[in-house]
């Protein structure tokens, strides 16, 4: 066996490494530019576009936008109603930890929303929106009351509301008969 001398040269780098470090090749005109692309701008903004600054919105436009966002926030409890109704239906009417937690959350969120109504809409309140914001707040309160009524429906379905006569037997008085009938045996 003969020993092969090891060369001190390392192998040349692969072609992809050479392509990575090489400058890009000039563009060939075989592929047309996409519609709307101009090679003269190269995707950069022109000097005229930079000089035209966007004008700030007027106070009326800002107030209109704030009212639209406030309406979105006021109707948010209504958007959660179908999901909550389906979840309440699927959880069943038996007393289990899952259904009790669901009912607790169904009561907690609307009550929290009702207590924080003014703080929720504080960021939308300006001199221009104050007159129309009361309607938005009223709708928010109505939607939270509808969510509470869903919770009351579920609690009634679980049998936890005292709606039958037998639920109030402790406060019933014994009836005093007006007449008594005794059977005589012969």
Image (spheres, rainbow, N blue to C red):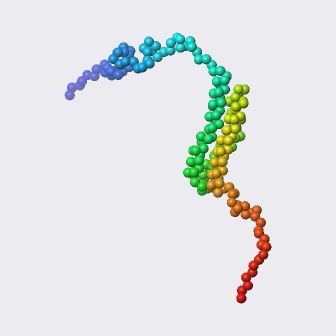
Q: Is residue 156 above or below residue 25?
A: below
Which residue ends up furthest to the bottom in the rendered image?
186
Q: Is residue 47 above or below residue 34?
A: above
Can you see residue 38? yes
Q: Quadrant of residue 140?
A: top right
Q: Is residue 50 left or right of residue 159?
A: left
What residue is drawn where x is 43% and y is 15%? 38
Residue 50 placed where, x, y %?
55, 13
Q: Is residue 109 above or below residue 183?
A: above
Which residue ends up furthest to the left in the rendered image?
1
Q: Is residue 41 left or right of residue 63?
A: left
Residue 184 placed where, x, y %?
73, 84
Please identify the quadrant where the N terminus is shown. top left
Please identify the quadrant where the C terminus is shown. bottom right
- How many marks are shown on the rendered structure? 0
Residue 71 placed where, x, y %?
64, 34
What residue is drawn where x is 69% and y is 60%? 164
Q: Nearer the viewer, residue 20 or 174?
A: 174
Q: Is residue 177 above or below residue 106?
A: below
What residue is drawn where x is 63% and y is 21%? 57
What residue is drawn where x is 62% and y is 34%? 72
Q: Nearer the viewer, residue 145 or 122?
A: 145
Residue 39 placed where, x, y %?
42, 14
Can you see residue 108? no
């Amino acid at each position: 066996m003969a020993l092969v001398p090891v060369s001190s040269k390392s192998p040349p780098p692969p072609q992809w490494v050479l392509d990575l470090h090489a400058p890009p090749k000039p563009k060939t005109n075989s592929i047309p530019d996409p519609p709307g692309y101009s090679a003269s701008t190269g995707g950069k903004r022109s000097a005229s576009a930079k000089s035209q600054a966007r004008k700030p919105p007027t106070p009326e436009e800002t107030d209109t936008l704030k009212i639209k966002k406030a309406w979105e926030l006021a109707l948010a409890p209504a958007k959660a109603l179908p999901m909550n109704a389906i979840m309440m239906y699927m959880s069943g009417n038996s007393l289990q930890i899952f259904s009790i937690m669901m009912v607790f959350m169904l009561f907690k969120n609307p009550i929290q929303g009702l207590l924080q109504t003014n703080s929720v809409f504080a960021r939308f309140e300006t001199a221009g929106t104050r007159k129309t914001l009361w309607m938005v707040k009223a709708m928010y309160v109505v939607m939270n009351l509808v969510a509470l009524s869903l919770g009351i429906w579920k609690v009634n379905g679980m049998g936890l509301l005292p709606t039958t006569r037998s639920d109030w037997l402790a406060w019933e008085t014994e009836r005093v008969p007006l007449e008594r009938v005794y059977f005589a045996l012969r």
